[in-house]
Amino acid sequence: MTGIIEIDHLSKQYGSGTKALSDVSLTINEGEIIALLGPNGAGKTTLISIICGLVVPTGGTVRVGGHDIRTDWRAARRMIGLVPQEIALEPFEKVINSVRFTRGLYGEGPDDAYIEQVLRSLALWDKRDAATKELSGGMKRRVLIAKALAHRPKVLFLDEPTAGVDVALRREMWQVVEQLRRDGVTIILTTHYLEEAEEMADRVGVINHGQLLLVKPTAELMDEFGKKTLTIELDEPLPEIPAALADRDLSLTEGGKALRYDYDTRAERTGIARLLGDLAAHGITVRDVSTRQSNLEEVFMTLVTETQDEVTA
Ligand SMILES: Nc1ncnc2c1ncn2[C@@H]1O[C@H](COP(=O)(O)OP(=O)(O)OP(=O)(O)O)[C@@H](O)[C@H]1O
């Protein structure tokens, strides 16, 4: 199956000598949402910038909708919308004019019916005559999306759409992305938040040091790595785990003062209730409990270690 984006053996070495991408190959299917995860400097922005024609690769090819981004760049660019990380809007410009203007930049004729549709779908129609400086942070981000959609692209890049925004705004952005998915737009987003990838993406690609370490359906990645840890602080330290609880995935920590229980958040039964009941039945009294979910950093470290193991095996 051919994808809407086909990245083939892509490499980029900047003039400074930095190797930002090494031999990256990836096919992105029409209508899917793919999240690119990776720490700072991993190469995510470089990858997006190459596909969008802003950075020239040193090796490999990219095709968007079958159009080579270098030899057929005009057609390739037309299929793409980019929502940058930084909010850069002309403060006194009216929302609707700012979107019309971007459409014009792509050489597209006026189409106010389509622009109305975009503004309505992003809940910006009521604000169409407001100056962008009067808008909230969330609305400004939505204006950036409206501008990126102004020329009816089939593919939308969202570069860290929720970096530095509060939880409410993050949820609002997720809803906007969900709406775009329903409209059939293919979305590539970069993020540092595993939760964001889990919420929105069909597939996740992990990048580190310019290499695409893996690409997996999100559900699979979460099954493998989305573990949660329950720490049970005990009233009295335990010398060892009681034999009756030996079959549980338990370990003693903090010199016996706490029990650690790793469980899968997706499992139908986490076993927590049964575990707490069994502890009580064995006369083990609990002082406090706390939970912690593995974050991207830990998932990422697991992946990096595994990949290195595979290379050296
Ligand atoms: N214009 C440039 N000139 C030289 N080196 C660059 C340039 N742009 C990026 N780099 C380097 O390339 C590497 C990859 O950077 P890139 O911005 O693609 O990473 P990123 O994954 O997007 O990071 P972040 O999460 O911080 O946005 C880094 O080492 C960076 O310093």
Image (spheres, rainbow, N blue to C red):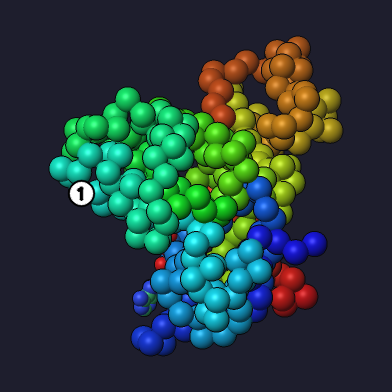
> In which quadrant is the C terminus drawn?
bottom right
Describe residue 145's horizontal placement relative to residue 235 as left or right.
left
273 vs 84: above or below: above
295 vs 85: above or below: above
Question: Image quadrant of residue 107?
Answer: bottom left
Question: Image quadrant of residue 276?
Answer: top right
What residue sits 36% from the left and 86% below the top?
Answer: 16
What residue sits 55% from the left and 54% below the top?
Answer: 155
Describe residue 137's horizontal placement relative to residue 116 as left or right.
left
Asked whether 225 or 220 is in front, the reply is 220
Task: Locate residue 88, reporting x and y percent.
Answer: 26, 52
Residue 226 is at least partly visible in this image: yes
Q: Secondary structure at mark 1?
A: loop
Describe residue 94's horizontal placement relative to residue 274 as left or right.
left
> In which quadrant is the N terminus drawn?
bottom right
Ligand 1, image quadrant it occupies: bottom left
| Residue placed under numbered mark 1 in the picture | 90
Q: How many marks?
A: 1
Describe residue 289's horizontal placement relative to residue 137 as left or right.
right
Residue 173 is at least partly visible in this image: no
Asked whether 137 or 279 is in front, the reply is 137
Asked whether 271 or 171 is in front, the reply is 171
74 vs 190: above or below: below
What residue sits 61% from the left and 30% below the top?
Answer: 230
Task: Locate residue 101, reporting x and y percent.
Answer: 30, 52
Counting other residues with Cα less than 10 Å from the Cα at mark 1, is it few (<14), some (14-19), or many (20 or more)?
few
Task: Locate residue 150, reporting x and y percent.
Answer: 42, 48
Question: Image quadrant of residue 271?
Answer: top right
